[in-house]
Image (cartoon, grey):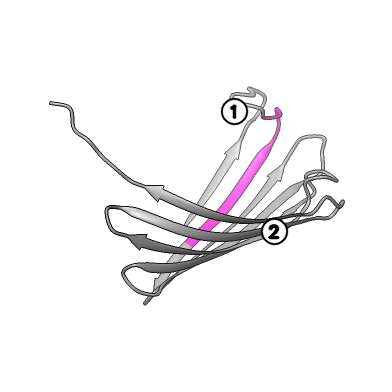
Amino acid sequence: MGIQYVNVGDTNVIAKSTPGSKALRLHASSQFGQWTVSASIESLDIDKAEKQDYQNVSSIYQHNDKLHFAGAYGRVENVSVIADGDGYSLGAFYKLPLKTVVSLVYSAIDFDGGSDRKTLSLGLSQKFSFTIK
């Protein structure tokens, strides 16, 4: 659990920030048996602009040592006509031998201004390591 606050002031020291802007973020994560649930809420108060809001909640269900499922939902408000909207993802991840993971993930974004996106992806990840002597 945490809280973060930033006040840019008039220095503009944060990349792509607007002087006079402030941001507040609350976030938390907890585990309940095989479930992990996380959430965050962020509000940006940008000088001379409308306040922007971001919300996100995600969850992982560890079915067994090899298989887990994950889901996430997010909402963006007051950013822009083309960026505001809802998005979610659902995925399954299965561990194979030799540090290999195969995944199937469905994602959808419903933009308030149209141009919705839906994606189905099949992934293969291979982890490896080496040491230099």
What kind of element bears circle 2? Answer: strand
Left or right of residue 90, residue 131 in this image: left
- Quadrant containing the N terminus is bottom left
Count of numbered badges drawn on the protein: 2
Disc 2 versus disc 1: distance between alpha carbons? 31 Å
Residue drawn 63% across and 22% down? 11
Q: Is residue 59 above or below residue 108?
A: below
Say which quadrant the C terminus sits in: top left
| Image spot of residue 30 (x, y percent) | 43, 67
Residue type pointed to by label 2:
Ala
When asked about the image quadrant of residue 14, the answer is top right
Is 112 a magenta residue? no
Q: Secondary structure at mark 1?
A: loop
Q: Residues within 10 Å of mark 2 (few under 14, many from 20)?
A: some
Q: Residue at x 59, y 24 (%)?
A: 13
Q: Which mark is residue 108?
A: 2
Tell me the residue at 27%/53% (across/down).
Answer: 98
Identify which residue, 72 or 107, lies in the foreground. 107
Query: Which residue range is magenta in the image?
Result: 17-28
The residue under label 1 is 14
Classify mark 1: residues with Cα within 10 Å, few (<14), some (14-19) or many (20+).
few
Q: Would residue 74 be seen by someone viewing this image from the given angle?
A: no
